[in-house]
Amino acid sequence: MQTARPVAAKAARPTVISRGRVVRARAAAAAESPEDMGFKTMRDGVKVAADETLLTPRFYTTDFDEMEQIFSQQINPNLNMAELDAMLAEFRNDYNQRHFVRNETFKAAAENITGPTRKIFIEFLERSCTAEFSGFLLYKELGRRLKDCNPCVAEIFMLLSRDEARHAGFLNKALSDFNLALDLGFLTKNRRGGSDSSSGGWPRLAGVHGSWAARGLGLCRRKYTFFKPKFIIYATYLSEKIGYWRYICIYRHLQRNPDSQIYPLFEYFENWCQDENRHGDFLAAVLKAKPDLLEGTVAKLWSRFFCLSVYITMYLNDNQRSAFYESIGMNTKLFNQHVIIETNKSTERLFPAVPDVESPEFFMRMDRLVEYNSKLVALGKSDLPAPLQSLARLPIIERMVAEIFQIFIMKPKDCGSVDMLPAAEQAQVMY
Ligand SMILES: [Fe+2]
Ligand SMILES: [Fe+2]
């Protein structure tokens, strides 16, 4: 169990930089305007969000009436309220209340990151901030809509949104070290299916970021993707667990290789990832409250589908941006493979089927997808006229679809949670 601890002392181990080097780096960083690095700004220091693609983080909405039915104690006899009450007590403890406190080393470290590395750092921070903010919006809305039907679950979702707001805020503050920020209030005015009040918690955030959040950071105008509740539950469980493994792997790597610790953000990942792990455990309890998501042939197909969607998206995204991971001394492929294997091990204790990611065929095919994706990216950057680019994309996309299909039909691992077995069989497994 995580306990709250002041991190300032730990995070205060700055990269040692000579005064002359700092001055030169500061001048170099200041000379690189956002426009020079290829970023568009909507006003001074406020970045226009990156274009949305199939692989970028999205904002989600769902059928909240159906969600109410899942969490209604009158309708759903599978809700384990004792477990959910215990989880609520855990979230109320707020172990990371004092964790996300910045120190004086951030700005100087950011100024020391220049050239292409500076650009990829900004892109990493933007993607991470958008993903965290997406979680904040979804959980906040769920907390608001479920208040009447299940106050316990509603409060847990509110506390999840508290954590995600902190994460997004911390990342957006890190962007300001690079003289940019995302306008995180803008989106809330453009919300489909939600009122302004649903997202009004953002400017009133409690905690260490309240003051700057209150200045109204705005949000980048994005479309909302609709997912049915069952898909939201699968997808959020997986994104929390994979988020946990990503953060802890980066943290452990940098603990072993302190010379690669070029920006102090990563020193916060150890406690941060425990938030994501707790979120994932709560969503596992939610999945168990809907046994049809964890039992039967259809559930097995959806489980594999969502695992593959999450794994493939991360693998293609990260390998497209391997320069970022190399800048902190990581081998992108090995890092991703480790994260996928560990996430799959966590997931197989819950989902009824998962892909066999340890089969040699799995990553061989994933690497082929990376090659095809690189060709698509190169095509996008080429001077070919748009119609010819579209035409040239078709055979590559066809190969990617075929490769994904081959991965999907690979022999899966049958697995699942002991909790889903009949009581007599549970006893046999456990004792
Ligand atoms: Fe988070
Ligand atoms: Fe989370």
Image (spheres, rainbow, N blue to C red):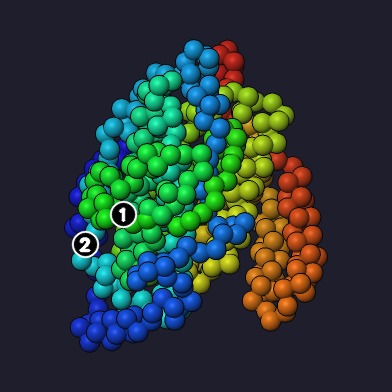
Q: Mark 1 or mark 2: which is in front?
A: 1
Where residue 207 appears, x then y in whole percent? 24, 46
Pick the front one: 269 or 202: 202
First of labels 1, 2 by sequence position: 2
Circle 2 sits on which residue? 103
Circle 2 packing at 10 Å, graded few (<14), some (14-19), many (20+), is some
Q: Is mark 2 within 8 Å of ligand 1?
A: no
Q: Residue 161: in sight, yes or no?
A: no
Circle 1 packing at 10 Å, graded few (<14), some (14-19), many (20+), is some
Where residue 377 appears, x then y in whole percent? 65, 70
Where residue 273 appears, x then y in whole percent? 39, 48
Circle 1 sits on which residue? 216
What amino acid is at disc 2?
Answer: Asn
> Which quadrant does the N terminus fall into?
top left
> Could you tell whether 427 is left or right of 253 in the image?
right
User: Cα distance, mark 1 to mark 2?
Assistant: 22 Å
Q: Which label was assigned to residue 227?
A: none
Residue appearing at x 55%, y 63% in the figure? 51
Pick the front one: 14 or 195: 195
What amino acid is at disc 1?
Answer: Gly
State the SS at label 2.
loop
Residue appearing at x 27%, y 38% in the figure? 94
Where residue 231 appears, x then y in whole percent? 60, 37
> Could you tell whether 387 is left or right of 4 in the image?
right
